[in-house]
Image (tube, rainbow, N blue to C red):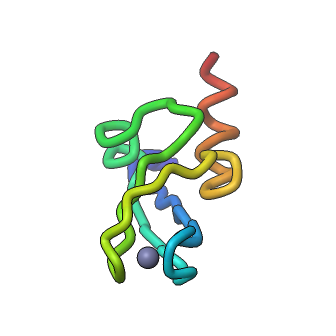
Amino acid sequence: MDKQKKRYTIKAGCPQCGCTQTTVMTNEELQERYGHVPNFDLECGECMAKFSTPAKDACPEWDRECRMKE
Ligand SMILES: [Zn+2]
């Protein structure tokens, strides 16, 4: 059971151009970049718009783990 190697997919739709952003991050990367937050701050790779999206929608798996640690 190597939990650090688990990968999480963060998926969000850009509110400005409508494209779908998919980011795959490891547990460690997620922890470092966002930590246990209710919302992810993301930047669209197409139009560079910055937006935030609820973690429970973008990555339900990570959201669940966050709540388990509370
Ligand atoms: Zn966009």
Residue at point 63%, 46% (across, down): 54
Q: Percent position (x, y) of residue 70?
A: 63, 16
For residue 49, above or below residue 3:
below
How many numbered badges does the structure rendering display? 0
For residue 40, above or below residue 5:
above
For residue 69, above or below residue 49:
above
Residue at point 39%, 55% (across, down): 26
Whether residue 7 sits left or right of residue 61 in the image: it is left
**Residue nearest the viewer, comparing 52 with 17:** 17
For residue 64, above or below residue 43:
above
Whether residue 16 sits left or right of residue 34 in the image: it is right
Ligand 1 quadrant? bottom left
Q: Percent position (x, y) of residue 34?
A: 39, 39
Q: Percent position (x, y) of residue 40?
A: 48, 46
Residue at point 53%, 62% (across, down): 10
**Residue nearest the viewer, comparing 49 with 22:** 49
**Residue nearest the viewer, comparing 41 with 27:** 41
Q: Percent position (x, y) of residue 60?
A: 69, 51
Residue at point 42%, 33% (across, down): 35
Instruction: State the residue lying farthest toward the top.
Output: 70
Instruction: State the residue lying farthest toward the front.
Output: 16
**Residue nearest the viewer, comparing 30 with 6:** 30
Whether residue 68 sits left or right of residue 48 in the image: it is right
